[in-house]
Image (tube, coloured by chain):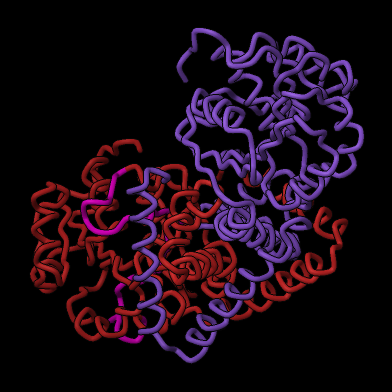
Chain colours: A red, B purple
Amino acid sequence: MSEVAAPLFHRAAVIGIGLIGSSLARAMKEYRLADSVVCCDRSVEACEAALRLGIVDAASPDLSAMLDGADLVILAIPVGGYAALADELGPLLRPGVILTDVGSVKQTALRDLAPAIPDGVHFIPGHPIAGTEHSGPEAGFAELFQGRWCILTPPPGSNDAALAKLIALWEACGSKVEVMEPAHHDQVLAITSHLPHLIAYTIVGTASDLEEHTKSEVIKFSASGFRDFTRIAASDPIMWRDVFMNNKEAVLEVLQRFTEDLTALQRAIRWGEGEKLEAHFTKTRAIRRAVIDAKQA
Amino acid sequence: MSEVAAPLFHRAAVIGIGLIGSSLARAMKEYRLADSVVCCDRSVEACEAALRLGIVDAASPDLSAMLDGADLVILAIPVGGYAALADELGPLLRPGVILTDVGSVKQTALRDLAPAIPDGVHFIPGHPIAGTEHSGPEAGFAELFQGRWCILTPPPGSNDAALAKLIALWEACGSKVEVMEPAHHDQVLAITSHLPHLIAYTIVGTASDLEEHTKSEVIKFSASGFRDFTRIAASDPIMWRDVFMNNKEAVLEVLQRFTEDLTALQRAIRWGEGEKLEAHFTKTRAIRRAVIDAKQA
């Protein structure tokens, strides 16, 4: 948001230049948060796109070359790819480097990465609560994080200075920062993010299995509620596959609660219990008001 | 949208001056679709609000007074109120009057109203696929119907001229009009509108049952998917109670399909079947593209 006098970092390396990675690269360049911003992506096309878009100073699939001299490394790939990258990543990190990520699940980020991180490297996982249904380097924009929360989950004994620098980074991007336990993060996000996405994917999938004629009408008349679900269900499939594979317990638990509640409403519909439906539909309005009051609407 | 040389109607009476009724009243006045626009609402406060907002020429809870001289009567109350109104409404309708409604369920609209409609009155149910999560006369706006579909479900033997006038009315409001069978309407809307609303009401209800501390975090981090559901789940409780009570069979049927699909995804998560999740999440993107192509996004 605001430009800083001296950049927070010398060389910031973003690994994975998708929606979040490219938005962060743009923000770091635009707000001058690092002397240079580089990216590494296994896709040559994505690297070329990042260079063409002018959002990084260098880009290459060569991890070693991109991490050379970096004092900030940001992992912005689907969380399912962390374990496979860990052994390659670890030896490339010099003491004093700050490593963070932007993944949607935090317990497995620690599980998959921490063992491979050398002593002296400051690994502090993070998760910006921001995004759109679009993917790839072209989809990013510097303002994505403005007014949004970013959750950091520092492991016990984390370096205070490193944490302070990451907080400064996110605040400079316009975010509000919250620090919490990884397990708590995964539980809260299972409700606010993972379950809503699973439900949206389900309902859009149910519609896409309809016979062609009805399906075309569903699309035609989608403004009546359905279209909001199609937006959510257009999010990146790999990213979301990995979220559900990595936050299984919390998602299954909240899904069980959801199914019980849906079954109760279904029963009220079947038995014509209008007063139960009305009471439920009235209760949910209070949550909307709270979301508006919290300026998250 | 466009002003017409001679108004389509002499006196248009809107019964129920909520979001849809007041939007239609505004549109009819702004686009000069009737010489005068009046409204009847059992709430004196709503009538006073309509007069204060200047969206009607007259307003009163007295149905007989408001319908006197009306050649167009638009029912814009929750569908659960149709049956109770039918016996009072019928004798007030003169031959030649066009009666329509804006309710979300069309089979029960016909069931509850048709027997009380005198011969010579042209009853053609309708349903504009438009709305917001806000309620009441203040929430309406003339542009609500622009670019949106309106479905008309004329019973067999409907008067062609009356149907043509209703089509002209909605097109003048900026809508595209589709004519279909009531049963088919109820089936399509169960998928595009009723199921999405039920799901949103459920998930927001599940969240509102959480302990206070977690609930406040759900609200704080709602931008990650949950907030879109809170908007839908803030819709009018009485209207939606009536929708589910009146489109029970179609809703229960599509809900059964949804539950089967959700159970399949739940099982894939439990057993770590990533390829199944990815295939499903990829499939749903095509529907989003179709919604965008249909200019309904």
Q: Quadrant of the C terminus of chain A?
A: top right
Q: Which residues are magenta?
A: A114-142
The residue at the point 57 percent across, 22 percent down is: B142
In-image side of B53 versus A202 (left or right): right
Dividing the picture into quarters, in which one does residue B55 lie? top right
Dividing the picture into quarters, in which one does residue A103 lie? bottom left
In-image side of B140 versus A92 (left or right): right
In-image side of B113 versus A137 (left or right): right
Q: Where residue B63 sits: x, y (%)?
A: 87, 23
Q: Is residue B217 visible?
A: no
Quick check: B264 above or below B73? below
The residue at the point 26 percent across, 85 percent down is: A84
The residue at the point 67 percent across, 60 percent down is: B198
Residue A58 vs residue A251, the one in the foreground? A251
Q: Where residue B128 sits: x, y (%)?
A: 59, 38
Q: Where residue A63 sits: x, y (%)?
A: 13, 73
Quick check: B131 above or below B275? above
Residue A30 vs residue B113, the one in the foreground? B113
Q: Quadrant of the N terminus of chain A?
A: top left
Q: Is residue B164 visible?
A: yes
Residue A124 vs residue B143, the one in the foreground? B143
Q: Where residue B279 sits: x, y (%)?
A: 35, 78
